[in-house]
Image (cartoon, rainbow, N blue to C red):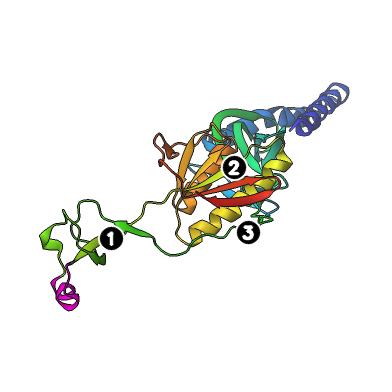
Amino acid sequence: MRIYQIIYTLALAVSFMFFVLYPPWISSFLFVLILILAPIDLIASLPGMLTKGMLLSVPPVLNKDEYAVLTLTTTHKKSYPVKCIVAKMHVNGDDFSVKYKLRCLPENNERREVAIDTSHSGVITFSLKRIWSVSLLGLFALPTSINIKQSVLVLPLPIKPVNPIVLQHGTHLRPKPGGGFSEEHDVRKYRRGDPVRSIHWKVSAKYDSLFIREPLIPQPHSRLVHVMAWKNIAERDLILGRLRWVSGYLLKRKMPFYIRICENSEVVEVTHENELIDFLRFTLGDNVKGINKLSRLPVRFSWVFRIDTSGASGRRT
């Protein structure tokens, strides 16, 4: 915008000198014409400058080194003309913070796309605090304060552990406390105290001994993925990459699990992909509400998986 202001100031100065040194009417007309350009520019552009806004959109989740763009889009109540919209953007990551200005031009449908740097994992936050609507001739800029903030989660790629984990398959059942109805059941010999209504008379008659129908229900899961702490971003990418692989392995087989990072940190339960993404977002520093932190844990974990920089190992307890 400054270049247009400089050009206008030089043109006004030249026309004034021409008016002083060359009195005929043509010099007066030229000087007045250039002089009134500024208020005309302001009056013609003011409706558009007062009604312009801006939207910022970014993908919520990306993989490391994946190509993606953020989009700036100009909004307006009516299509009043302006020269352009200038936005001042703040970009904050784990170990960097930059500021730069972007222009949205009418010839590009007042839309601007900027590539997102996904070379590092973590949460990248983009925020717009102020925009400027520039008049048609570029002589004036009207500032507007806006508070728009969007963040994108850049995840490390899944990394298969050095020692692949072998887990049990299928659904494990246990006797239903108190008996009752269940779609799954087992047949066993009668024990003192078993309810008479549970006796399986056909099997008992066949073997000439009392057998009962024992209802079964799925055994509550108690699998724990224990993630060790990291010292730098490179170690974090490696550990969380292995966590993504292990989590994908479990979720693909519909096996919910718990996650704990370090010894004394809180434990969260993961039953589907969205809960894993929310946990990773929270772990990488973004404020996420609704994380399913558990205050009560299973008395004993049936499986414990340890993930660190050396690999991943699992044991059954």
- In magenta stretch: residue 132: no
Crowding around mark 3 (Cα neighbors within 10 Å: few <14, some 14 to 19, many 20+) is few
What is the C-alpha distance between the residues marked 1 and 3? 32 Å
Task: Give the label on residue 227, or none.
Answer: 2
Q: Nearer the viewer, residue 244 or 127?
A: 244
Q: Residue furthest front?
A: 208
Q: Is residue 214 left or right of residue 21?
A: left
Residue tagged by mark 3? 164
Q: Is residue 12 left or right of residue 99?
A: right
Q: Residue furthest top?
A: 20
What is the C-alpha distance between the residues marked 2 and 1? 33 Å
Looking at the picture, which amino acid does disc 2 mark?
Val
Any part of residue 151 in sight: yes
Any part of residue 59 in sight: no
Dot in front, 1 or 3: 1
Estimate the x, y position of residue 236 in percent, counting from the top left: 67, 41
- Residue segment shown in magenta: 201-210
Q: Residue furthest bottom?
A: 206
Task: Give the label on residue 276, or none.
Answer: none
Q: Residue at x 51, y 43 (%)?
A: 259
Look at the numbered discs 1 and 3 and tell me whether their residues touch, using CB distance below 8 Å.
Answer: no
Q: Secondary structure at mark 1?
A: strand
Q: Secondary structure at mark 2?
A: strand
Crowding around mark 2 (Cα neighbors within 10 Å: few <14, some 14 to 19, many 20+) is many
Residue tagged by mark 1? 216
Looking at the picture, which amino acid does disc 3 mark?
Pro
Q: Nearer the viewer, residue 221 or 193?
A: 193
Q: Earlier in the sequence, mark 2 or mark 1?
A: 1
